[in-house]
Amino acid sequence: MSGAAVRRIAWAVGLVAAVELAGREIARRSLLHLVIGGGASIGALVVVALIACAIAIAAARGRSAAGPILTVCFALGIALQLQLGARLQSDGFYYFAYLRSIAFDHDVNFLNDYRLLGLGDKPYLFKPTRTGHAESAWTIGPAIVWSPFFAVGHLVAVRLRASGADVAADGTSYPYRQAVCVASLAYGLLGCWFVYRLVLRFFAARVAASAAALAVIGTFMLWYLVKEPSMTHAASMAAAAGFTWLWASTQHHRSLRQWMALGLVIGFAALIRWQNILLALLPGIDAAVAVVGALRRKDNGMVRMTLAGGAAFLVCACLAFLPQAIAWHAIYGTWIARSPIGPQIRWFDPHLADILWSARNGLFSTTPLAYLGAFGLLAFAAARPSVGLPAVATVVVMVYFNACIQDWWGSDGFGGRRFDGIVPLLAIGLAACLEYGAALVRRHAAAAVTLALACLAVWNVALAGAAQGGAFRLGQTLPFDRVWGAQAQVVHRWFGNPFTYPASLLFALRNGVGPGDYDLLSTNRFLSDPLQPYGRVDVGADGDDWLLGDGWFAPERDGAATYRWASTPAMLRLPLDHAAPLRVQTRLHAFVYPGAPAQTLTIVVNAHACGPLAVPAQWETVECLIDRSAWRAGVNDLSLQFGYAQRPADAGLGGDQRALAAAIDWIRVSIAADGTGR
C-alpha cells in the first residue's frame, strides 16, 4: 500500500473518531453503536484519533500535516467540552436568540425567545423598544456563522423526536445548544490555521506552528474553545485571523479586488464582534503611507488607485455589515443603534493600566504570554516596520478602546477576552520572541543558565522565609502543593506579580506599599466607576480584611451584623481612584461599662483630622465631611482615634484583656452631595 493511501486511511479513521465525539455531544449518543456495540469510551476514541493522525502525519512525506493535526485538536477539543460540561451559557444565550428567532420566527423580536431560553427573570430585556421589540445589545454575526451547525442540530432533534425521545424540535433543546459549542471549536481551529498561515509569512514553519499553538493554548482563547464555546470569541478570533492573514498577504501588491475582499472580511468580522472594525487600521495605515509617498513622488496614478481601493474597501465593509444594520432597524428603528442595556463607552476615562496589569482580568497579569507577545511585536516592528508598525498601532488602539468600556475587566469573563481580535498579531510577537530569544540565549548561554539557576535559588530562599513565618513546622512532612503554596506567598509578598510590572512597581513606590499590595489596592479603587460614587469597607467580613491595619480584633457577630472591636487608633487603607470631597460614615457603638465616660471619635485622613464626634452606646451611624485636599489618588491612610480604650477585665467584666474602644460594623465613603466637602 502506498504512503498516500496509508495517509488517507489513517486520516479518515481519525476524522471518524472526531465526528463520533461531536455526535455524542450534539445527540448524546454514539453514532457508531451499530459497529462498536455500546460504544467506545471517550478516552479510547481520543487515543484512536491520536494514533491515526500520527500515522497520517508520518506518512505525509513533506505534504501539509495541517489536516491531521486539526483533526486531533478537534477530537481533543470535543473530549474536553464533554469533560468540562460546555454548554450554552452566559452571553451565549443572547447571540443564540438571534439564531433561534430568525430560524423559527423569521424575525429579530426576542420577546418569546428570551422566555424560551430561560431568561424571563431579566425584566430589562423585555422593556419594549419604539418598534415593540425586545432589547438586544449583542451582534448578529455569531448566528450567521453558527447556522450550518444549528441546522445539523435541527436534523438531530427531529430524528430524536421521531424515535420517541423527549426532545423539542423548536430550536431550544440540547441538540441545538450543543451544536453551537461544536461550531465554536471548529471556527476556533480554523482561526488557528489562519494564525499559522499569517505567522508563516515572516518566520519558519516550526516557529510559526509553535507561536500559533501558544497564542491559543497559552491565552484566554482556550477557555472559549472548550469551556464557554457559546461565547463569540472563537468565531471572532477566526474572522480576525482571516482578515490579518489576507491583509499581510496582499500588503505590497493589492488590487482593487483584494481591497474589496478585505472590506467584505472586515465587515463580516465586525458582524461577529463590533470592535473588530478597529482592525481596519491595518490597511488604512497602508493606504495613508501609500498616498503620502505617492504625493511626494507626484505619482497621481498611485494616489487615484489607492483612493479607489480605499473607497471600495469601505463600500464592501458596509455591505458586509448590512445584516446588523437591518437588525438594528427592526429592533430600534434606526440603521445605526446603541442599546441602552449595553455597557457605556467612556472615551475620555480609559483604564489603561488596569486593563493591562490589573489583577482583575488584566491582559498581561492573567496572560503572561501576551506580555511576551507584546515585547516580541515591538521587536518585530523594529525589524519589519511596514508590517510591524501598523500591527503595533492597531494593538494600541484596541487597548485604548477596551480600556474605555465601562466594565473594562470583561464582567464575569475569563481573562482579557475582549482582546480576541489581536490574538493573531500577538502570535507574530510570540514568534519574534521565540526566534530572537533563542538567538539571544545562544549568544549568552552562560548568563541564561545562571538566570534560571538564580530563580531556583530565590525559590529556596522563599522556602526559608515560609519556615521563618511559621507556615509549617521544621521537620514536618508536608504535601508538595502546600510547600509550594507557602513559597509562592512569600515570593508574592516580596516581588508581587512580575507580570504586573512596571505598573505594580510604580504603584508601590508612589503609595509606600509592597508590590504584592498592587493586586487588591489598585484594582479595587473606590470612586473608579462614575455609576458608583462611593466605597464601603465591611469591617466584620473576611473579604475586606486586606484593608484593615493595626488596632483591630477578630470578627464577631451581633445578629445579622458582623463587626470587629477596635482599639485606638484603628487603621485602614482606603484606595481611591481620584481625590474628591468625601462624606465618611461609620456604623458603630462604644464599649460600655458601668461608670464609663463618654466615648469620642476623631477621624484622621492623611494627617487631616475631623472631629471629635460623639460615639453612641447603641448601634448608630456617625459621619464627617472631609475636604478634597485631605485625600489623594492612590492609597489613603485613615485612622479612627478614640478618646480611650478599656480592657473588660479592668472594668470588672470578666477576664478579657483586649483594650476595647468601639465595635465597628462598616465604614463608607461617598462623594459629598454639595461637591464642597463642607
Image (cartoon, grey):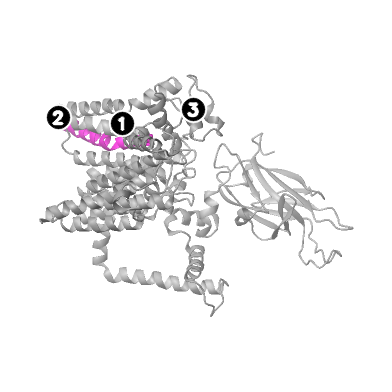
Q: Position of residue 345 (x, y in %)?
A: 46, 34
- Which one is closest to the eye, mark 2 or mark 3? 3
- In this rendering, would 198 be left or right of 455? left
**Dot 3: what SS?**
helix
Query: Does residue 456 lie above or below 399 as drawn?
Result: below
CA gap between label 1 and label 2 equals 30 Å
Circle 2 crowding by C-alpha within 10 Å: few under 14, some 14–19, many from 20: few
- Residue type of the residue flagged with mark 1: Gly
Q: Position of residue 97 (x, y in %)?
A: 43, 32
Of residue 587 and residue 285, the one placed in the foreground of this image is 587
Location of residue 352 by image quarter: top left
For the point 24% across and 45% down, the residue is 385
Of callouts 1 and 2, the N-terminal one = 1
Q: Is residue 322 visible?
A: yes
User: In this view, which residue lies farthest toward the right?
Assistant: 595
Q: Position of residue 53 (x, y in %)?
A: 23, 55
Q: Position of residue 106 (x, y in %)?
A: 39, 24
Q: Which mark is residue 112?
A: 3
Circle 1 crowding by C-alpha within 10 Å: few under 14, some 14–19, many from 20: many
For the point 12% across and 53% down, the residue is 4
Residue 279 painted magenta: yes
Q: Which residues are magenta?
A: 272-297
- Residue type of the residue flagged with mark 3: Asn
**Dot 1: what SS?**
helix
User: In this view, which residue lies farthest toward the left?
Assistant: 2
Of callouts 2 and 3, the N-terminal one = 3
Q: Which mark is residue 267?
A: 1
